Amino acid sequence: MTRPVAAPAALTLTQRPQWQALQKHAGQISSHHLRELFAADADRGERLHAEAAGLYLDYSKQRITDETLSLLLALAQACDLDGWIQAMFRGDRINTTEQRAVLHTALRAPRNEQILVDGLNVVPDVHAVLDRMAVFCDCVRRGAWLGHSGRPIRNIINIGIGGSNLGPVMAFEALRHFSQRDLTFRFIANIDGTDFTEAVQGLVPAETLFIICSKTFTTEETLTNAHAARAWCLQALGDEQAISRHFVAASSNAEEVIKFGIRTDNMFSLWDWDGGRYSMDSAIGLSTMLAIGPDNFRDMLAGFRAMDMHFRDTTANSNLPVLLGLLAIWNSNFLGAQTVAILPYEQYLKRFPAYLQQLAMESNGKHVTRDGTRVDYPTGQIYWGEPGTNGQHSFYQLLHQGTQRVPCDFIGFCRSLNPLGDQHHQLMANLFAQSHALAFGKTGQEARASGTPDALVSHCSFDGNRPSNTILAEQLTPHALGSLVALYEHSVFVQGVIWDIDSFDQWGVELGKILAESTATEMAKLNPSIPCHDSSTEALIRHYQQRREAAP
Ligand code: F6P
């Protein structure tokens, strides 16, 4: 069943009474400090939390009251959030501009589930690919997959960009603890030759396997790097036959994969109902499965699934992705925040902020609603961040005393995978201290009382009242990573539903791609005197060409 799309809403989002009630309410909230909200409710810290799929979300340090929550939930209801959630899980074509179903949740559905797209159950195909991936990974991991000259594969290089890089590299780093240490993993994304050159540094071609990860298999950067890899391999191995032992693909474009020279039995399929930034648990995760093994990969899928079921079946007021999404709407649309800081207190999650950047910003950086009307409210915040405690010695100054308010998501784990003395306690003490300091600040009076000289009191006081969420899990296992990623996937969707935008297309990346192609062609003509751009771009190209020609 296809969801009726683009039926003109009687009211635009900002005309809805629920939206206007929130606007009015935001005016009232601004006169309340988090200090007062906590003082007035001894149970606030216990009360304003939700727990599911192994994750504990504390949102008591958000600038909200019970009324804020009920107004946000009323807005969600008015936007038919539950209807959209059910439509996504059902496989309706909710990616309306591309007329596609949005079924990343099918990637972690159990074998016995039935999810129909155009009358066909997609779940058996998903499991068939997972099973083939498992056989392949087992073979490589036990050294039975031999390169062309008979040596076992020791190095795995993932070539892909966007979702075909950020998911794999984030998951590899996050789950490195569970990885097979005698295999080396590297990731190439950039068209900058440095990325390729450094990635193959010191590796022996006869022991190296390339995964060409590209849903479309037409992405310029990936194809260029794949051809460089082919040449690097053939130069050493000297035989076209070598390609079948040293190249595999994760793609939905069998025709192009074959054209490149990869056999279809070395190809792991993807589907048009799964977008690049939602694909780390599909065949795009082949490098992850090679690193951590099929069993751990399945644990990760179980984590995704646990959050999926929670999201689908739990009432909105205790639904983690719904709460996280609505709080993001509150902070950005009603309290004026433009960015979100992602602050994992876990070194293994060092690539998580970059991963979320694509997930959130490619999904929700949209300027028109589903029916093409320009929005009259901000959409899509800027996601950024670094692991704690490193960020504390860099940008936290602005978080605490800057003129912009940056809502923060702190992420921590109760047990370390690498206990070292009491370092984990220190790490977590820093996390708790930071969210406390942001919320409660330090008054001038407190600064004076702690001995700050009068001249420095204003410098050493902190306004506080800066909102944050804290997400805790027991330990960074594959299951926990799956739940955490699914939490953010769904919270991004919740925001898109409220904003009435298509969170699953990415038309905004097209213009730059097309212009880069034509610019490259023009530059190759080496005739800077023929004008084809604006005067700034012309001057830059001329400068670039002249300096290149002048170089020894
Ligand atoms: O250009 C954006 C994009 O389409 C992303 O959405 C996607 O993750 C990336 O490019 C890579 O695409 P592909 O997997 O098809 O190479």
Image (spheres, rainbow, N blue to C red):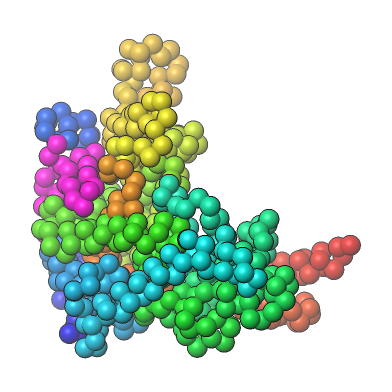
Quarter of the image for residue 189 reads: bottom right
Q: Residue at x 57, y 64 (%)?
A: 152
Q: Is residue 497 above or below residue 28?
A: below
Would residue 94 be seen by someone viewing this image from the given angle? no
Observer-nearest of 238 and 463: 238
66 drawn magenta? yes
Span colored in magenta: 46-74
Q: Is residue 163 left or right of residue 90?
A: right
Quadrant in which the N terminus appears = bottom left
Place of residue 473 in the rendered image (x, y in percent of width and height, measured from the top left)? 27, 44
Quarter of the image for residue 56 reads: top left
Place of residue 42 in the rendered image (x, y in percent of width and height, measured from the top left)? 11, 30
Q: Is residue 347 above or below residue 1?
A: above
Quadrant in which the C terminus appears = bottom right
Q: Is residue 128 above or below residue 428?
A: below
Place of residue 8 in the rendered image (x, y in percent of width and height, measured from the top left)? 20, 80
86 drawn magenta? no
Q: Residue at x 26, y 72 (%)?
A: 106
Observer-nearest of 82 and 74: 82
Q: Residue at x 31, y 84 (%)?
A: 99
